Amino acid sequence: MRFKFPIHRKIKSFFVLSLALFLGFGFALAQKTTKRITSPMPESLDERIKKEIAGFQGSVYIYAKNIDNGKTYELRADERVRTASTIKLPIMVEVFAQVAEGKLKWDEKFVLKNKISGSGILGEFTEGTELDLKTLVNLMIVVSDNTATNMILDRITTDAVNERMEKLGFQHIRSLRKIGGGGEAKIIDEGTNRLFGIGVATMREMGRLLEMIERKEIISKEACKEMIEILRRQQYTDGLGRGLLETTPIASKSGTLDRLRSDVGIIYTRKGRIVMAITVDDMPFVDYSFENPGLKLIWRLSQILQEGLK
């Protein structure tokens, strides 16, 4: 015997089945869509920095600040490090201060003697050549001239530089001696100071000194403006300044030793003026080429910091 279901029951059954299929398909589609649009959380600035330095053979010290929005990043920023030639920045500050106080004059003449090796161009000049103070300061910063630096320190002394830094509130930035020896500061034998060579500082204090100059908070507005102009003519920009567009100015001072690279500067980005002070030390081998791993690391860290502090 065959039973016939009423037509309305067939329609009802078909409707229920269709609805179930539709809801099931919609749920599956929703699940699939949800999976497709889900993405991992973006890495924090600290995570990006730590990942970048994870495989680096050496010690890394960083202080960075966007002085227009206040964002900062720091890594071992309060540990004392060897300055190498970045100590020439506070030496320049002392020269400008003494000129402002009338103790020095820009046209004061210096006689070239006791030339030393290393960075700079005065080693190619004839001893006995006369140079004025303004020329020596420019050479000390723009081409990191070692002989010019020593000639300046002979005139102003390392102790005067240190007293100035103390007055400005810096407890760690210290000029310890001339390049190659001599002109030792009174504090040279305190603690472990001799281990730091020509100078010692922390990345936070170097960054803060740059910020004070940029904000025109020391000596005079005119002096700060001129110091920034000199720093912007820097010729050694293989670290912080590597790969920067011509439309992105940088005012900086670098430092180099066998196993150390350091760079302190201000990068003028569209999202703000970013002060950076980075030192890498204890590299396992000596490499004075453009491809030095410390230089390349400073460059990559600079890019990450520019992005992360905007």
Image (cartoon, grey):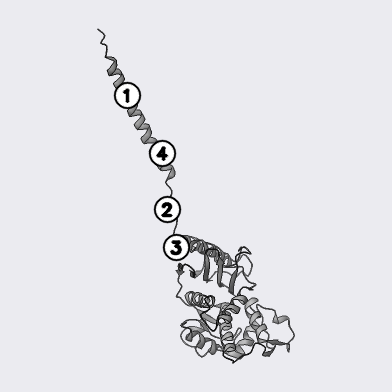
Three-letter amino acid code at the position of disc 3 = Asp
Relative to 30, is 110 on the left or the right? Answer: right
Q: Residue at x 56, y 83 (%)?
A: 93
Dot 3 corresponds to which residue? 46
Q: Quadrant of the N terminus?
A: top left
Can you tell which of label 3 and label 1 is closer to the viewer? Answer: 1
In the image, farthest residue toward the bottom: 103
Dot 2 corresponds to which residue? 41
Residue 69: image tag: none
Q: Position of residue 246 (x, y in %)?
A: 63, 64
3 or 1: tag closer to the N-terminus? 1
Can you tell which of label 4 and label 1 is closer to the viewer? Answer: 1
Please report contact status of discs 3 and 1: CB closer than 8 Å, yes or no.
no
Q: Residues within 10 Å of mark 2 (few under 14, many from 20)?
A: few
Q: Nearer the viewer, residue 86 or 309?
A: 309
Please report contact status of discs 4 and 2: CB closer than 8 Å, yes or no.
no
Residue 32: image tag: 4
Between the C-alphas of marks 3 and 1, the distance is 57 Å
Between the C-alphas of marks 4 and 1, the distance is 25 Å
2 or 1: tag closer to the N-terminus? 1
Three-letter amino acid code at the position of disc 1 = Phe
Please report contact status of discs 4 and 1: CB closer than 8 Å, yes or no.
no
Please report contact status of discs 2 and 3: CB closer than 8 Å, yes or no.
no
4 or 1: tag closer to the N-terminus? 1
Q: Residue at x 70, y 82 (%)?
A: 122
